[in-house]
Amino acid sequence: ETTLTQSPAFMSATPGDKVNISCKASQDIDDDMNWYQQKPGEAAIFIIQEATTLVPGISPRFSGSGYGTDFTLTINNIESEDAAYYFCLQHDNFPLTFGGGTKVEIK
Amino acid sequence: QVQLVESGGGVVQPGRSLRLSCAASGFTFSSYGMHWVRQAPGKGLEWVAFIRYDGSNKYYADSVKGRFTISRDNSKNTLYLQMDSLRAEDTAVYYCAKDPGAAAGTAGFDYWGQGTLVTVSS
């Protein structure tokens, strides 16, 4: 089973900041990494696919990087609407596994 | 637009059964694999099960294997999760999620529902 270690668990940012969220896999998963955003009471939204590809319709302030075991979600020029829970998912092998999640608060 | 609406959650005693449903719309349901994912209170997300577009292949997390059964009715655009021998540790919000692909189950999820809460308690 591939373990994903996501950090930080919580972060507080000021509008306009650049935010990085890390996800480290316990084994090589190529680029089989997705990122999602979830707000309370709402369905999760797919934001980054295959580690680096922005999902159509998602703000270009979001970007993804990484390959193999180390991955990063970056939010540039963060806005108040970006306050949410973010999590990574590896879909390289079963069982599909998730990072522990990051709660992003906007000051 | 794609919509996934879960239902069937509630409070159930340990050892009893419950069946969740996920009504799908806005896409050709019979062409895509589907998943169930859960999140226990205060815990991270856990993948539960996958079913191929035609129902011919299914995969389960070890934690639910032998107790939960995923199924689908493509004529009703509905996904199911039959949960038997429920335990306290099955308490969670259960989400259905659409796979971008049809058969392999290893393409992740492109759409999620809002979830339904299952509480296992005496």
Image (cartoon, coloured by chain):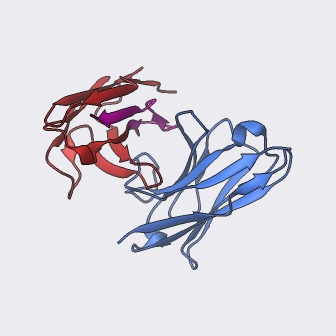
Chain colours: A red, B blue
Q: Please say whether residue B118 is one of the residues in the magenta stretch.
A: no
Q: Is residue A61 above or below residue A71?
A: below
Relative to A79, B31 lies left or right: right
Foreground residue among A73 and B84: A73
Is any atom of residue A67 visible in this view? no
Which percent across, then down, holds residue B8? 68, 63
Residue B46: image x %, image y %? 55, 38
Q: What residue is rendered at 86% in x and 44% in y?
A: B122
x and y percent of residue B3 in the render?
A: 44, 68
Does residue B68 lie above or below A15 as drawn?
below
Q: Considering depth in this image, is A29 or B64 the residue closer to the camera?
A: B64
Residue numbers of the magenta segment: A86-107
Q: Residue sitting at 80 percent across and 52 percent down?
A: B12
Tell me the residue at 72%/57% (across/down): B10
Magenta-colored stretch includes residue A101? yes
Res. A89 image quadrant:
top left
Q: Position of residue A68 (x, y in %)?
A: 29, 25
Asked whether residue B101 is in view, the answer is: yes
